[in-house]
Image (tube, helix red, strand yellow):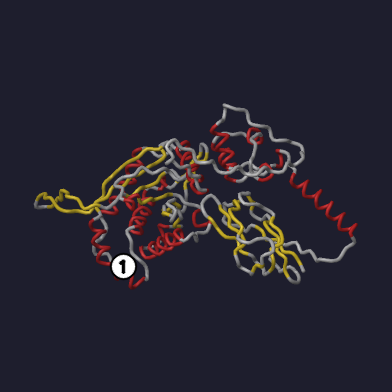
Amino acid sequence: MAKFELKLPKMGESVAEATLTSWLKEVGDTIEADEPVLEIATDKVDSEVPSEVDGVLVEKLFEVDDVVAVGQTIAIIEIDGDSPDTGDATPTSIEETTAAPEVVTAVEKTVTIAKEAVAAPVSSEDRFYSPLVRNMAKSEGISQEELDRITGSGKDGRVTKNDMLSYLENRGATTPEITPTKPVVKVAPTKKSTPAVPVSVNGEDEIIEMSRMGKLISHHMVASVQTSAHVQSFIEADVTNIWNWRKKNKDLFAKREGENLTFTPIFMEAVAKAIRDFPMINISVDGDRIIKRKNINLGMAAALPDGNLIVPVIKNADQLNLVGMAKSVNDLAARARNGKLKPDDTQAGTYTVTNVGTFGSVLGTPIINQPQVAILALGAIRKVPAVIETPDGDFIGIRMKMFLSHSYDHRVVNGALGGQFVQRVAQYLEEFDINREI
């Protein structure tokens, strides 16, 4: 018999760690190759970690809510024969042999000492910080010395995003605890407190614990408002041509392409074209520097079954035709609803579009999706009376119209650029060719 180390796989270029949310298998359970063993969560996406081998789960190395770094061993699986070849990674393979009691005792003592040495806090010079924490520190002007003094609540004293948010909230009011610079005796962690008992005056109120994703969204929204100077520009667009064109072609499109033709890919196409015209909307801010993004990667806010929103990204959106855009939109929306998005699907966005009209809203003032500098909200399409100008004079007619709400970061996007951009999007929508072929 041999033992195989199940490690946290690489989940995306910018993903360095994940939170263990649940174990799908218990110690002693038989596991087949490719069968999910546990569930993890990054800032955006929940994923399953499958086993690479057939075997029996013999040890869990992390508990629920622990933060695990990419490449760390999460569990030990006992397998028949030698450990399989896993490429670059070399899993630990331990042949089970019968040993004298004295040898077993000596080995157990050695393992215990080794575990205690690994668990001991390290000096600040060797302390690990995730890319997210380092970026937060940089954007808030926190020096390395100050960062080293922040007490971490993560595994082995690691500073988490929540630690940073809590520290920034109380910065200046309290003095952070100093992280020990010498190894100390590891104290067994206390059990998490039970959820608060509902307290009410009239017996009808209820206290509801926020979900994990709800907490993340809450922190993201607060951090974005504290980071960016939000301003908005609004414009109304006549989308009658788009409405009539889609009505005429949606059945043919579905029959030919096997895809539903919604309004979203048409709107996304117009946004991508407008970004090409105004590339300084496609930027992010790094301290006192502006990063101008080469690729146009459109984030598309999608509703989840629990009511939360997630933002999958259409990569290189300006290079897609309408068919390709429709396939990308439908694929990402379907996988978002079914919880099948991968971490890479939500990374590297440069501009975001959200459709508040889905919920019947005529207008919305969305919060910028950091580290981007702008976001566009699409309002509901309404049938309204409108003045129509013709060579023979003006008259009142029935038109299909919608409002576009553009929120942008006034630190780097002035009113002229923010207004001209959303005006250009409206122009592309209104000039849509009613005779366009699919």
- Mark 1 packing: few (<14 Cα in 10 Å), some, or many (20+)? few
Residue at 13% x, 50% y: name it.
396
Residue 193 position by quadrant = top right
Q: Can residue 93 be seen in this view?
A: yes
User: Which residue sits at x=66%, y=32%?
Assistant: 177
Q: Where is residue 116 in the image (x, y as percent from the top left)?
A: 78, 46
Q: What residue type is labelled 1?
A: Ile
- In the rendered view of the protein, which quadrant contains the C terminus? bottom left
Image position of 98 (left or right of 304): right
Residue name at image x 26 percent, y 47 percent? 236
Q: Nearer the viewer, residue 146 or 351?
A: 146
**Residue 247 locus on image (x, y percent):** 25, 64
The percent position of residue 400, horizontal first and vertical second, equals 22, 54
Q: Residue 434: x, y in percent?
A: 24, 62
Residue 88 can be seen in this image? no
Secondary structure found at label 1 = loop
Give the vertical position of 411 relative to 353 (above or below).
above
Closer-to-camera residue (393/371): 371
Report the residue marked by disc 1: 438
Could you tell whether 331 is left or right of 100 in the image?
Answer: left
